[in-house]
Image (cartoon, rainbow, N blue to C red):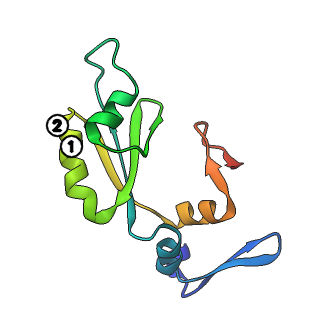
Amino acid sequence: MEYLADQVVILEKGEVSLTGNVKEIIEQTFGNKKSISFVVPNLVPNLQENTIEQELGFDNITKQDDRYVIEYQAEEEAEILEKIKRQNGTNIYISDYSFEDAFLKNLGYVINEKGEITHE
């Protein structure tokens, strides 16, 4: 629905928090960042959690259930994708951030594992 609007105003507790069109709000919030998530089959029983971080060379990897998630600059995409493939990464999902992501981040909310919106 928000993509039909020329301008969006985000209110927080009755005060204007952010204004702009959808694309501007997403860019103001995330810049040129994207997100990639993937699964690495655990072929070695005692694989250390930080092995993936070391192998990929990134320290900003988070884990959500069985998926690893990396936030990165769009121009790094080919390099990151190649590294993930070398580590036998599967079920790879690359996504741009949405207006919903920007809305939640700007107001300090997150969606937890249960799908509930909570304040950070």
Q: Position of residue 40 (x, y in %)?
A: 29, 30
| Image position, residue 72 (x, y; %) | 36, 57
Looking at the image, residue 101 lies above or below residue 43: below
> Callout 1: helix, strand or loop?
helix
Query: Looking at the picture, does residue 28 appear above or below residue 95?
Result: below
- The residue that appears at 53% across and 83% down in the rendered structure is 21
Residue to which mark 1 is pinned: 83
Which of the 4 image quarters holds residue 113?
A: top right
- The answer to whether the residues at label 2 and label 1 have Cβ atoms under 8 Å apart is yes
- Choose between 74 and 103: the one closer to the eye: 74
- Three-letter code, disc 2: Arg
Mark 1 crowd level (few <14, some 14–19, many ≥20, 10 Å Cα): some
Comparing 120 with 52, the one in front is 52
Residue 96, position as x, y percentages in the image: 39, 62
Mark carried by residue 86: 2
Q: Is residue 119 left or right of residue 6?
A: right
Task: Look at label 1 and name its amino acid.
Answer: Lys
Q: Is residue 106 left or right of residue 15?
A: left
Q: Residue at x 48, y 36 (%)?
A: 64
Q: Residue furthest bottom?
A: 6
Could you say which is closer to the camera, residue 88 or residue 113?
Answer: 88
For disc 2, the neighbor class at 10 Å (few under 14, some 14 to 19, many from 20) is few
Which residue is most to the top?
Answer: 45
The image shows residue 104 at horizontal and vertical percentages of 62, 60
Viewed as shown, does residue 97 lie left or right of 45? right
Above or below 72: residue 55: above
Residue at point 20%, 53% (across, down): 79
Q: Secondary structure at mark 2?
A: helix
Give the Cα separation between the discs numbered 2 and 1.
Answer: 5 Å
